[in-house]
Amino acid sequence: QVQLVESGGGSVQAGGSLRLSCAASGPIGSRRCMGWFRQAPGKEREGVATVLTGYSNLRYADSVKGRFTISRDNAKNTLSLQMNSLKPEDTAMYYCAVTAGTWVGGCPIGSYAYSNWGQGTQVTVSS
């Protein structure tokens, strides 16, 4: 089972930027869904952005469209999330995840399809 390790979280002021990175311990083949999810205290985990490995299929939550960019580096076996124009409501623990099997079409933004999860990295945005 592939292990995922997130990094890059921290504390920033509103309007600032952060770049999250997720390193995978083993190969992740093509047509797997990888994504970033977040969970704020007292709230359910929600999808932020997803990508279908080997393809340009990207999906974003409406709340982050135009501000966040997900990218996959196959050579480095990493998944990144560039977060710009951060808002206090972006404060949450951010998780990287990947599906166990291959996927056809766009990757789901819901967490139900993802079986491998990292430990998370905290992002705090102050006003």
Image (cartoon, rainbow, N blue to C red):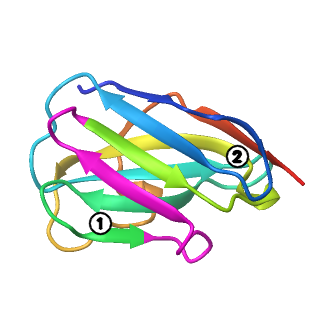
The answer to whether 92 appears left or right of 46 in the picture is right
Provide residue 53's location: percent of width, then percent of height: 18, 54
Of residues 109 and 6, the one drawn nearer to the viewer in this rendering: 6
Provide residue 123's location: percent of width, then percent of height: 68, 41
Q: For the point 31% across and 44% down, which residue is it?
A: 98
Q: Main secondary structure of the magenta part?
A: loop
Q: Quadrant of the N terminus?
A: top left
Secondary element type, mark 1: loop
Q: Could you classify mark 2 by the number of other residues whose Cα lies within 10 Å: few (under 14), some (14-19), or many (20 or more)?
A: many
Give the image quarter of residue 76: top left
Magenta run includes residue 61 = yes
Q: Which residue is identified by label 2?
A: 92
Per the rendered image, the range of residues in magenta is 60-77
The answer to whether 104 appears left or right of 37 in the picture is left
105 w.r.t. 93: above or below: below
Q: Which residue is identified by label 1?
A: 107
105 w.r.t. 36: above or below: below
Provide residue 118's location: percent of width, then percent of height: 45, 31
Secondary element type, mark 2: strand
Residue 6 seen from this side? yes
